[in-house]
Image (spheres, grey):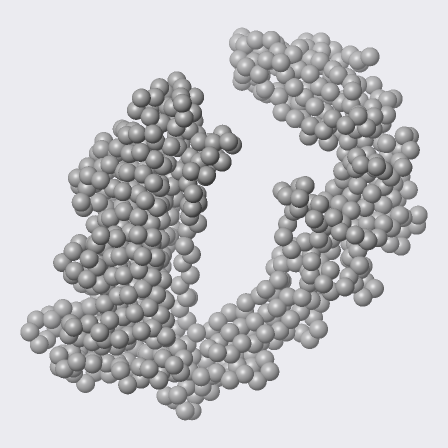
Amino acid sequence: MKKKIIGMLSVCAMALTLFAVNKMTTIVNAEENGQVVYVSTNGVDSNIGTISAPFQTLEKALDEVVDGGIIVLQDTVTIDTWEKHNKEVSITGGTLQMTWSNDIVINDSVNFYNINLLVNSATNVYANGNSVTIGENVVWTGSPTLELHGGGMAGTTVASTDLTVLSGTYKSIFGGSKSGTVLGDTNLFVGGTVNSDVDETDHAIDCFVFGGGNGDTIKGSTNVTFGGNAKVVYLFGGSNNANASIANGSNLNVTGGKGMSAYAGNRNVDAKSGANAVITGGTFEQVFGGNERASMTGDVDMRVMGGTITRRVYGGCYNDNSGFSFSTSYYVNGEISLTIGNATIDFSSSEPDRSIYARSRYSNDVENTQLVFANETAYNTYKNKLAAQDSTMKLFMGSLSAADELHCYTYTLNNNVITQTCKYHDTHSATASLSLEENLVEVYNGVALEPASLEYSGNWEYDQPEIVYQNNEKGGVATCSVSIGDQTIEDTFTIIEAPTILGGSVRLSTPAGLRFQSKVSDGMVEMGATFGTLIIPRAVLGEEELTVETAMVENIEQTQWATDIVKENNPAAYEEGYEYFNAVLTDIPAEHYGTEIVARSYVCLNGVYYYSDEVERSIAQVAAFAIQDGYTNEVLYTYVDTALVDEVKTLERQVILGENSVYQLMLSGVKNYVAVWSVNEENVLTIDKNGKITARQAGVARVKVQIGTTVLYCEVIVREDIEDNTNELPLIPYD
């Protein structure tokens, strides 16, 4: 049977923010940045939310905390409903009492950690499609049968889900909704110390984890990762109960933890799509690629690559038995592929049915199945341990083989061609060929470059890995490779990336001047390229393109790097993998403070030049930007004043606005230089850095604008009784 290509499971663990080792340090640092508010039952909502003046309600704290901030509960705080605030917050400390209903909906993206969550005895908690993390040291009290959902309540619709669970004890955890709809994918990560007090070997315990929901509709796929030290009795990649559907299949990724059963599929329902599972860690008694208590429509791809399985591995569905025959007949209506890698399948369980089958646990041969050994180690370990290993299961399964087809692929490499053969089929031979132009040089154009091609012969079986690129998004030597089995094809190509010129700035240290800074990928440096910056007045250049061949151009070659200075003094501008260099134009005469200078950096490799975009700046223009950013060096004002000495500066004397209106003040006589705007009455109006007014309430305010050392004023009257903005007084030049 030729294997259909099924996309490998790629479930990434959610980013677990604010999980610092020392939570107090996190809070202190955030507090210094104004990102922490405090809540106490003894607080007052008219307080300011500090540790000594806390709010009384969580609702007030959610209103006031900044996006990304932390709410600290100082004692037991009660919330009566959870309104939506469109924020991501962390909540820690004390106890949060959520007993207003048996259905608790969390309407914001929240990270809970180091907290007690008090709920009613039979509670369902819904993340409602928000990104919710139950982090470290979260204790749920009040409900011995708690059910946690990444989606919403019955009848609701959410776009997607993102639920991370690292602590607490649960009857059930669902990545999806309860009889609701998820328009996209469900994403669930379970790890940490979840269900630490559960006996995962007890078949009678109701302790479930589902990547999907409970009777819900999922129009994307389900994705669940289970790992860490978490425990579970029954783990499912898909959904539970009748009417559940999954459009694009279920995906199970087991990296650690312990459990009794792991199913790639669903429970009590055929969700009408296939299932994928990758097991690389953890300890389980049994793993199945299909469903429990239902047949499966769709293909199954289950890969047991690591971890420990103590009893049985089946690629298909589970069927119960009555006496010495099966009492149900569930199977996979599709193709089943089971891959055995370097897992430990030790058959150490004392229970009967110690087996390895690519089939359902069912005695009828009704499925298309294949079993693949991932490598020769797995082949040598398990080739004689397939099918039933105990007399009881041999009686149940009879003479049925472990799979319709067995494969152990081997791979050999010759130049850029990998040849596939099979230990079980000596006539099989297929090839994968990587093609790349010899000594290829590509010019970076802003997107990742992927010039190689990979071709598989028509008789290729099993996986068809794609090309993996490295360093193909910046200048330097890029690699392309494809790994199949124990063989890897690798090739290289060269990417030329022009420098990026970052604009101009004023150099205040002696000698002062106009500085242009550029960055270039470290790969270009490693290839031995040379760099520089071209500088010329716009009036001299005209509309011609600036190159090293331009007449009268100043070519400032790079002789030293400014990377360490950028990293230390301007970390926000620093980008890993790049080197920085400067070009400085000094001794600019006063009459040229306003002269527009064109600058363009370049890289030269093997005699060929590659150029950045052009930037155009005057030292006065750049000085004006520096003043706006808060710099007050006297030389900055000198540059601006000198460049504008002959300009007539004008501004409206008076403007009348209606409440909530917006008005752009017109400042002229300042060329294209920015100014510094401010207002004396911010309760009346606000003004942005470009002079745009937003009227807030009735009153009179005075707007001040400063350009160089010149100061201008405008009186702004905000009235309730007008709708149109009125410029009452004419533009009059200032002295």
Q: Nearer the viewer, residue 695 or 15?
A: 15
Q: Position of residue 11 (x, y in %)?
A: 40, 58
Depicted 132 relative to depicted 610: above or below: above
Tell me which corner region of the image, top left, top right, bottom left or bottom right, holds residue 394: bottom left
Q: Residue at x 26, y 81 (%)?
A: 386
**Residue at the limit of the structure toward the left, as seen here:** 323
Can I make out residue 366 in this image?
no
Q: Residue at x 26, y 66 (%)?
A: 284
Q: Residue at x 41, y 76 (%)?
A: 462
Name the side, left or right, on which 731 lies relative to 409.
Answer: right
Image quadrant occupied by the N terminus: bottom left
Q: Position of residue 570 (x, y in %)?
A: 66, 41
Q: Nearer the viewer, residue 124 or 638?
A: 638
Q: Residue at x 40, y 21 (%)?
A: 53
Tell me which corner region of the image, top left, top right, bottom left or bottom right, holds residue 350: bottom left
Image quadrant occupied by the C terminus: top right
Name the side, left or right, on which 697 lies relative to 186.
Answer: right
Name the side, left or right, on which 525 lies relative to 257.
Answer: right
Q: Position of residue 347 (x, y in %)?
A: 23, 75
Depicted 1 relative to depicted 290: above or below: below
Q: Position of residue 354 (x, y in %)?
A: 20, 76
Tell me which corner region of the image, top left, top right, bottom left or bottom right, holds residue 364: bottom left
Q: Nearer the viewer, residue 279 or 335?
A: 279
Name the side, left or right, on which 485 lies relative to 58.
Answer: right
